[in-house]
Amino acid sequence: MGGKDGMDRRSFMRKGALAVALSAAPIVSSPKGAIAGSAGKFATLIDLTKCDGCAELGIPKCVEACRRENASRFPEPRKPIRDLWPQKTHDDWSEKRDVTDKLTPYNWITVQKVQVDGQTLHIPRRCMHCDNPPCANLCPFGALRKYSDGAVVIDHASCLGGAKCKSVCPWQIPQRQSGVGIYLKLHPIPAGGGVMYKCDLCHSRLEKGLLPACIEACKGRKGEEAPMILAQRQKIAELAGEAKRRGFYTYGEKENGGTATVYLSRIPFEKINSALSSADQKPHMARVEPKLMEVNRWSKGFIFAPLGAALGALGLVLARRANGKEEK
Ligand code: SF4
Ligand code: SF4
Ligand code: SF4
């Protein structure tokens, strides 16, 4: 009894300490929302020498936990789904919700499996949470924000699904579901066609002092050997530096100007990327030069922000009119 109470108390204190550590993150949410160009408070370290893809399970723990955590936010499209305007297609994953081997609007993390140098690698993939995210900088409607905890988050209520975020993301991470969102009230306008979905680093859990669901699930299965951990950005940088001294390769520290996700591997990422490419697996792990950063700032400041503001205002007027008509 005493032992159990002791365990409960220790466990509670550990959770409490974690809550204090995580909830200390101030949130930046200005209208443009960005702290673009800044490293956030937290980062993720993913050690590929430790991840076994949860081989004994049907679905990896991290994937299952993410789907459970975010199920209430998954899209419920209005059917029949109209084609995107002016194209003659639309994106519909609603009948393929069980897909876990790729990123979809219903699956925000996937674990790639690839053979490299006779070894099987399992690679958890989700948004990298870039320091200077082009997706947030170039969204014409300001629907994405970078928060000071490190998370890059899509506001589903203001996303029109134009997929600019996906086209400017070096890894093509955000995924679109048509037939859902504010777009339904504005259709047709020359942008949009649903809502974009991706990992948000469990931003709302971080606000409550909780670990991201995928990381908590991985920790629960692997304990101290957890391949995926979250820590203060500085701590992750120190761990990555120490790993490099021990012969590890890293991916994500410098990619796209820096990200809040760092992978460790004993195999060079050039080889891993070749294997992914040969197996036709996405997202890639190619080196991503940070040259887009300056372009992003310029584009955001001089072209897209005013355009976004104008289109956003127009959208809101149209939406209110549409709502008014529906209410009458
Ligand atoms: S990261 Fe952890 S939970 Fe996810 S597949 Fe690897 S071992 Fe399993
Ligand atoms: S990985 Fe892609 S979607 Fe994620 S923050 Fe970077 S640019 Fe945006
Ligand atoms: S951080 Fe949260 S949203 Fe992102 S993959 Fe993990 S569980 Fe899913």
Image (tube, grey):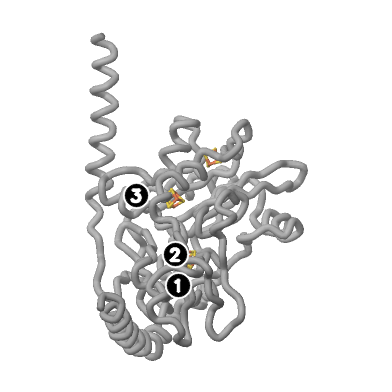
Of the numbered discs in the image, which one, if any, rests on residue 130?
2
Q: Which three-letter amino acid code belongs to the residue tagged 1?
A: Cys
Residue 133 visible, this angle: yes
Residue 295 visible, this angle: no
Of the numbered discs in the image, which one, if any, rests on residue 135?
1
Is residue 22 or residue 78 the one in the foreground?
Answer: 78
Residue 65, percent from left and from top: 46, 42
**150 lies left or right of 328:** right
Quarter of the rendering occupied by the N terminus = top left
Q: Quadrant of residue 278?
A: bottom right
Residue 94, percent from left and from top: 54, 58
Quarter of the rendering occupied by the C terminus = bottom left
Is residue 49 or residue 214 the one in the foreground?
Answer: 214
Q: Disc 3 marks which residue?
A: 232
Residue farthest toward the top in the current orientation of the protein? 1
Dots 1, 3 in contact, CB < 8 A: no
Q: Secondary structure at mark 1?
A: helix
Residue at figure coordinates x 48%, y 59% from the top left: 127
Badge 3: how crowded within 10 Å, few (<14), some, or many (20+)? some
How far separated are the C-alphas under marks 2 and 3?
15 Å
Residue at figure coordinates x 76%, y 46% from the top left: 117
